[in-house]
Amino acid sequence: MDQSSITWADGALVTIDQRALPHEVRELRITTVDEVIDAIKTLAVRGAPAIGVCGAFGVVIAARAATANGVLDTARVEAEAARIADARPTAVNLAWGVQRTLAKLPGGVSALEAEALELLAEDGRVNLAAATAAADLIQRLCGDRPLRLLTHCNTGRLATTAWGTAIGALRVLHERGALAEVIVDETRPLLQGARLTAWEMAEAGIRHRLTIDSAAAWAMATEQVDAVVVGADRITADGAVANKIGTYMLAIAAAHHGIPFIVVAPESTRDISTAHGSDIVVEQRAAAEVTGFGGVTTAPEGTATFNPAFDVTPAELVTAVVTEFGVLEDAAAARTSAGTTTATASASTAGAEIAEIARGLYASGWMPGTAGNISVRQGDTAVITASGLSKGELTAADTVTVAVVDSKPVDASGRKPSAETTIHTAVYRTRGADAVVHVHPPHATAVAIKTAGSGVTTTRFAGYELIKGLGSARPDLIDIPVFPNHADVPQIGADIEKYLTEHPEAPPVLFIAGHGITTWGASLAQARDRAECLEAMCELTTLTGQREIAVGDN
């Protein structure tokens, strides 16, 4: 059951043709870019994570076809990649998977293939982490009892590559013995719930009942639903959720009845470059999907249709969004981790806060001269210290506003942002942080140099009380990553982004050999405090010669 629904074998993408389910489990073997696009458009492959991985392998297929006599036609690959990304415009994972793989194009076909395989392996890990966090949340919200949950569309291993997101959470609850029943929306017009989710529920041995979409609100009214659990195809910077058509009306009904509405999705589904839900391009599908089904026409000939594939649920109707990093947002903080920080102050106000803390860290010797930088996130942008300025004389005006998505300035000040901007934006793209501090305290910097390797390593500290101030999952032990230094600072940012994406459990502190430390948090004060705790602990280890000390059983 846990076998991946997508595999790569001998240059072909092999998956389950979801058009044939539930009557036939039919293998689909994809070997050309046209077949990739057709499979995505016709929903033979569907689900945001699954089409993201499919798109990644589509780039590999394009590259193999564009190689002649050992020479790769990169322009042809880029053109084919653009065609693949356009196959379904609403699901952000497709473009994400294509672009992440395409970034390896300079390394040739082997590098593209390695990246696509990494995306495939990563998806299963991400799904299980998100599903487990969502199951934990649902039990906290609904209590320790057998739960009756409602889900929409299909979010299982068919929609991902393994385990599933929202259905993954149902599977975790089922394994815990905490699931009484699942009500499955049929999900008109293509019946993904009836054809696919019901099939997966039966495969997993989960008790379920199938219902028409329009009965879901009545199920809530008659106290047959404890929570609604759905997936997402895109989550914008304001916390709006694009998902299969019918999700919005479920959210409205859940809000009316006081029922938690939980969205489970990978971090890659969050799209902070799109500011508002209203900016999403909603795919309109063929009229035939509404005027009939299974080849049987059910409406008068020539009937006009309205057939959006998705709808958009505003953040205020979402109880929580859960990714592999845990619970990102709830009704009280929906805009915090989605991109609109709790500090909605202007850039000048953020600049004043940055300047004040920078002057204090300069006085401590941690930001000597022009070294070090601080940033505060504001939605899909970040305010960061400008380049080449003494931190001891920094003012509120000495900052630059940059886009989180690409690290480029978006204001007209003409100043250059700090060279380490890519380090800050790497953190913002992979974590729900609202502030980042990058400084050069002597003891922590020395520890980083002594423990550095040729690649990313980790160094362990245990037994120190200060660990509690570092945001570690354990209060007595922490493994802190140590990144190699590069003359090309964006390469450091790329290393950090890759590591944080692959290690959702990593603490909010890191070393860069010869290049100081970076910490982050929900506020600038918290990020600074973590830097102070890390430096104090490194000083103690320097004085004692011990990074790990014994603690009692309690």
Image (spheres, rainbow, N blue to C red):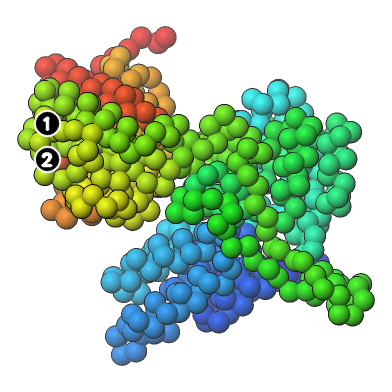
* Residue corresponding to mark 1: 393
Mark 2 to mark 1: distance in Å?
8 Å
| Location of residue 35 in the rendering, given as x and y in whole percent from the top left corner | 58, 80
Residues at circles 2 and 1 in contact by the CB criterion of under 8 Å: yes
Most foreground residue, 347 or 141: 347
**Residue sitting farthest toward the left:** 369
Could you tell me the amino acid type at mark 1? Glu
| Location of residue 29 in the rendering, given as x and y in whole percent from the top left corner | 59, 76
Q: Is residue 317 left or right of residue 433?
A: right
Position of 59 relative to 451 (above/below): below
Most foreground residue, 150 or 128: 150
* Residue corresponding to mark 2: 389
| Location of residue 260 in the rendering, given as x and y in whole percent from the top left corner | 70, 33
Q: Is residue 517 left or right of residue 321?
A: left
Could you tell me the amino acid type at mark 2? Leu
- Mark 2 lies on a secondary structure that is loop
Whether residue 543 is visible here, answered yes or no, is yes
Q: Is residue 110 left or right of residue 303?
A: left
Task: Name the residue at 32% across, 28% down.
Answer: 524
Q: Is residue 305 left or right of residue 14?
A: right
**Residue sitting farthest toward the bottom:** 69
